[in-house]
Image (cartoon, rainbow, N blue to C red):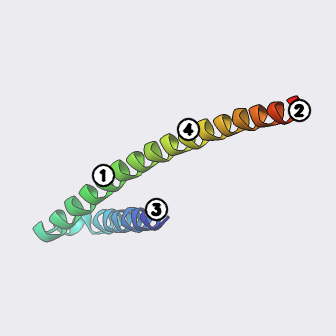
């Protein structure tokens, strides 16, 4: 969740910088520093999107493991119930 907030903040900052650039576009363009900041922000956004995808993939794998263990537990419970009924 913290990464999502950070990514949202970076995207918002990128949008703000982009909007500022558009508004001042007739004023001679952006400075080298602004351009570098924009590139840095874009790199951060790209990295956060990769991190998000990796975490979603990890989450999916963990959910599958949980599902598999729950199914195994259910089968074991059936076996226990069957053994109790045999006595």
What is the CA distance from the residue labelled 4 to the residue labelled 1?
27 Å
Camera sees residue 5: yes
Residue that badge 4 annotates: 64
Whichever of labels 4 and 2 marks the residue nearer the N terminus, that label is: 4
Whichever of labels 1 and 3 marks the residue nearer the N terminus, that label is: 3
Q: Secondary structure at mark 1?
A: helix
Q: Are marks 4 and 2 in contact (CB under 8 Å)?
A: no
Whichever of labels 4 and 1 marks the residue nearer the N terminus, that label is: 1
Whichever of labels 1 and 2 marks the residue nearer the N terminus, that label is: 1
Res 38 quadrant in image: bottom left
Residue that badge 3 annotates: 4
Whichever of labels 4 and 3 marks the residue nearer the N terminus, that label is: 3
What is the CA distance from the residue labelled 1 to the residue labelled 3?
13 Å
In the rendered view, does 76 fall on the left or right side of 15? right
Camera sees residue 29: no
Res 12 quadrant in image: bottom left
Residue that badge 1 annotates: 46
Q: Quadrant of the C terminus?
A: top right
Q: Position of residue 44 (x, y in %)?
A: 28, 59
Q: Position of residue 85 (x, y in %)?
A: 88, 32
Between marks 4 and 3 in the image, the one whose residue lies nearer the viewer: 4
Residue found farthest to the left: 32
């Amino acid at each position: 969740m913290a990464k999502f907030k950070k990514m949202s903040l970076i995207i918002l900052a990128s949008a703000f910088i982009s909007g500022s650039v558009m508004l001042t576009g007739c004023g001679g363009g952006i400075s080298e520093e602004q351009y570098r900041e924009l590139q840095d922000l874009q790199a951060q956004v790209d990295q956060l999107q990769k991190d998000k995808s990796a975490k979603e993939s990890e989450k999916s794998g963990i959910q599958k493991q949980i599902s598999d263990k729950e199914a195994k537990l259910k089968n074991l419970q059936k076996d226990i119930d069957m053994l109790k009924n045999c006595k």
